[in-house]
Image: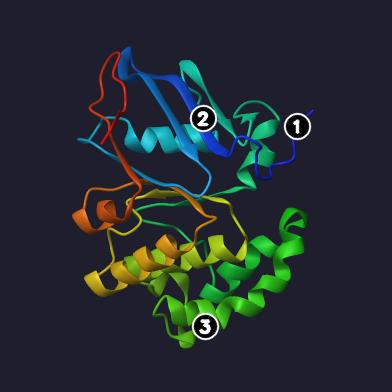
């Protein structure tokens, strides 16, 4: 039976144990373990190819690790549980794709699914969130293809908030933001005490707001080192 994804008794959102990821007989990462507490903001750093983005894909169930296990709110990221787990996750990529149509359509589209119907009333918060993220309401009527990278990233974050996702997986999600908007996003996430964030990042301003920074150096039998 799949557990309901609510606040766990142990207060742990993500548990990664001895994760091993192998491509073409080469270990990208092996023996990596990490626990992320609910409400914690954790950033993964390390050189290109060290497995940072791959860890996020494994949590989403998009990639199956060769070794180890991942649990989200006590549920293993495997089998039928994956679809339920994804209802608690939001993923924002470095070059985020919002799909075709207008920005308004992109935001409203997920609420057409039965799984998200209960959050449809949250769309009333859209004007306030657009203002909080320094986005003009006129942007809602523009085509998604016309948005800048930074605008797409902020719209994706707004959508995650509207869908009440408990965990944000951010893969260089501030890379296209100018300093002012980066501070805006950082301040919003910092103040969201109940929001769990696991991010891939390199810039100092983003890393400074994290509760913990975990360095991945990649390769065989490498452990994540918490700084």
Q: Nearer the viewer, residue 39 or 172?
A: 39
Q: Which residue is mark 1?
A: 2
Does any portion of residue 62 appear in the rendered image?
Answer: no
Image quadrant of residue 95?
bottom left
Residue located 47% across and 68% down the image:
155
Q: Please tell me the numbered disc located at residue 141.
A: 3
Q: Residue 51's spot in the image, x, y percent?
A: 32, 30
Q: Please tell me the numbered disc located at residue 15.
A: 2
Residue located 33% across and 12% down the image:
25
Q: Residue 12's spot in the image, x, y percent?
A: 55, 37
Does any portion of residue 133 appear in the rendered image?
Answer: yes
Query: Which SS class for mark 3?
Result: helix
Sooner in the amino-acid sequence: mark 2 or mark 3 = 2
Vertical arrangement, residue 148 with respect to residue 200, above or below: below
Q: For the residues marked 3 and 1, what is the alpha-carbon distance in whole angstroms?
A: 40 Å
Vertical arrangement, residue 21 with respect to residue 202, above or below: above
Mark 3 closeness class: few <14, some 14–19, many ≥20 residues within 10 Å: few
Residue located 38% across and 72% down the image:
147
Image quadrant of residue 123?
bottom right
């Amino acid at each position: 039976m799949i557990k309901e994804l609510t606040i766990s008794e142990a207060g742990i959102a993500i548990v990664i144990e001895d994760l091993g990821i192998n491509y073409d007989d080469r270990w990208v990462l092996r023996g990596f373990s990490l626990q992320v507490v609910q409400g914690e903001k954790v950033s993964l750093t390390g050189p290109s190819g060290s497995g940072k983005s791959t860890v996020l894909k494994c949590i989403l169930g998009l990639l199956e690790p060769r070794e180890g296990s991942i649990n989200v709110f006590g549920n293993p990221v495997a089998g039928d549980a994956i679809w339920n787990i994804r209802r608690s996750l939001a993923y924002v990529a470095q070059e985020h794709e919002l799909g075709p149509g207008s920005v308004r359509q992109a935001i409203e589209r997920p609420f057409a699914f039965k799984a998200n119907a209960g959050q449809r009333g949250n769309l009333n918060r859209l004007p306030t969130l657009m203002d909080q993220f320094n986005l003009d309401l006129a942007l809602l009527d523009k085509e998604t293809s016309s948005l800048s990278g930074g605008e797409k990233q902020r719209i994706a974050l707004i959508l995650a908030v509207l869908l009440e996702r408990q965990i944000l997986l951010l893969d260089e999600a501030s890379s296209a933001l100018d300093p002012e908007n980066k501070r805006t996003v950082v301040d919003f996430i910092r103040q969201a005490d109940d929001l769990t964030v696991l991010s891939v990042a390199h810039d100092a301003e983003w890393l400074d707001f994290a509760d913990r920074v975990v360095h991945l150096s990649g390769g065989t039998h490498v452990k994540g080192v918490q700084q």
